[in-house]
Image (cartoon, rainbow, N blue to C red):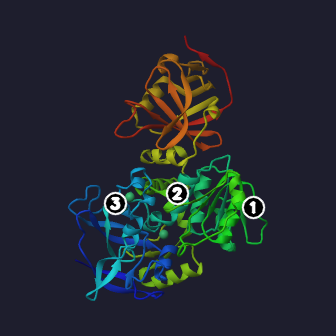
Amino acid sequence: MTAAVAALVRERGGSVALSEITVRDPGPDEILVRVMASGVCATDLFGIAGGAGDRFPAVFGHEGAGVVEAVGAGVTALSPGDHVVLSFDSCGACASCAAGHPAYCARFAELNYAPRSDAEVAGEAATTGWMSQSSWSTHVVARESNAVRIDDDVPWEVAATLGCGILTGAGAVITVLRPGPDDTLLVIGAGTTGLAAVMAARHRGVRRIIVTDPLDERRRLALDLGADEARGPDAPAVTDVSCVLDTVGTQETVALGLSALAPRGVCATVALRAGANPVTISQSQLLWGRTLTGVIEGDADVHRDIPMLAALWRAGRMPIERLVTGYAFDDIDTAVADARAGRTIKPVARIGEAVVPAGAPPAATPITGIRDADLALLWRSLPPVSPGELVGLWRGTGLSLDHPIQRQLERSGWFGKLFRSVDDVAPIVCTDETGGLVADARLAGGGATVRTVRHDGLDTAAMLYDTRPVIDLFTRLGPDTLLGVMTGPGTEVRGRRYHFVLERVPDRPVRVAD
Ligand SMILES: [Zn+2]
Ligand SMILES: [Zn+2]
């Protein structure tokens, strides 16, 4: 048993007040976490209002981040001292989990909302297990499966947001809607999920990002974070966009989203509302190839996507601090009241003693400065490329600087790649003694072709060498830049693949070596 302090809600709709509790020891597949910070999310307000049933006295909070204090006998991936983000739990065994979509786990409701009791207050059981954590507490029991290890450089106030709100908005964009440079995105509601969607869409180079929100201040922040246009409730209706993210989930916003879509467009709705929440939609609008879909938790695989979000934060591409307002733990009732009144976007309670408020967000890192371990995560978060888009001359820059392939390419005087067509590629173009360009077919073992290939869940343009079992795959980093990864036997060193940037340059003569 561990003595702890938790924010307790004693009755439906009641206030949130700190109480001394005792927390039980972790079971075989569980961990004990010393919570450092926890967000306040709309789902907590839903629970306090009794939306998840009469479970009082109860501890809420489901955006926890902290340090592992103890692990059960069956825990293998985590150790005491690890920094973890707590997120939703899943069974790992049902059809959705097996297919890589744990947010649609058959046991989601049971694992994340069923009342359980890991804590006692004055000898009486308090209901915990809220999203398998109840993180408004100095110590909580979580399962190994809903705790994700992250590096120590992520400030607690940022880490705490990665488990639900940011995951939902960024995941809806990166995993579900997947817009790219040819798309327009309408985001309805500029709360945490809406603004996370704006940041993720900006990261992916989405052509036009439009945000609607009734609050002036939120519209201004949306523009600051990369929206092209922010509209109030009286603005004329948006039309002809390819993607919509509805973060509100009412009759009005679902209808608004569907009406805004161009034919074949997709509208995703993410808000959790009480009961069945019936809405009426126009079947005639749907006929035009339009899709309306729901999304839970950004369709995330938390063990893949939370480290990805940390990598995007680290690269300056998700300045999450901009959404956060910190509160002392004993002021959590104010944090909840402010969340309810819409006075803050993402309130975060500083629960651990040594929580230092997050400093300025990292500046956008030039791509060459992104650390090796983050490159694969970054690659996957970007939009795919079609084979035809590769045609032209590209200058290459290695990113995996301590990879042996980097040294090989440097020795050869590597310049880049020339795609004459998708069937005629010079995979290795080098600079010769006179400064001219030469296609080195000997080093490349011949030429290459470009086809669409699936890698890490993305179907994207890939360069296949004629005579080597090596495939380079590309995602779009910017209008004229691609992020490349080399795959194939022997290309992986210490678990790391070779990554590089290709930058489009004006055509110039390339001699073919004989
Ligand atoms: Zn499952
Ligand atoms: Zn949430």
Q: Are marks 2 and 1 in contact (CB under 8 Å)?
A: no
User: SS class of the residue under badge 1?
Assistant: loop
Specify the quarter for ligand 1.
bottom left
Mark 1 or mark 3: which comes first in sequence?
Answer: 3
Q: 36 and 363: which one is in front?
A: 36
Q: 181 and 415: which one is in front?
A: 181
Task: Give the distance between the C-alpha atoms of the residues marked 3 and 2, in whole angstroms.
Answer: 19 Å
Q: Is residue 1 visible?
A: yes
Position of 80 with respect to 509 (left or right) is: left
Q: Residue furthest right?
A: 236
Q: Residue furthest top?
A: 514
Mark 2 or mark 1: which comes first in sequence?
Answer: 2
Q: Residue at x 31, y 85 (%)?
A: 20
User: SS class of the residue under badge 2?
Assistant: helix
Mark 3 or mark 2: which comes first in sequence?
Answer: 3
Quarter of the image where the N terminus is located: bottom left
Q: Position of residue 469 (x, y in %)?
A: 43, 26
Task: Give the distance between the C-alpha atoms of the residues marked 1 and 3, in whole angstroms.
Answer: 41 Å
Q: Is residue 228 visible?
A: no
Q: Amino acid at mark 1?
A: Val
Which numbered dot is residue 171?
2
Instruction: Name above or below for residue 14 compared with residue 187.
Output: below
Say few, some or many: other residues with alpha carbon within 10 Å of mark 1 (under 14 / 14 to 19 / 20 or more). Answer: some
Q: Residue at x 42, y 88 (%)?
A: 11
Position of 84 with respect to 360 (left or right) is: left
Q: 284 and 389: which one is in front?
A: 284
Position of 148 with respect to 213 (left or right) is: left
Say few, some or many: other residues with alpha carbon within 10 Å of mark 2 (under 14 / 14 to 19 / 20 or more). Answer: many
- According to the image, label 3 marks what residue? 145
- According to the image, label 1 marks what residue? 238
Task: Give the distance between the C-alpha atoms of the residues marked 2 and 1, in whole angstroms.
Answer: 23 Å
Give the total of numbered labels.
3
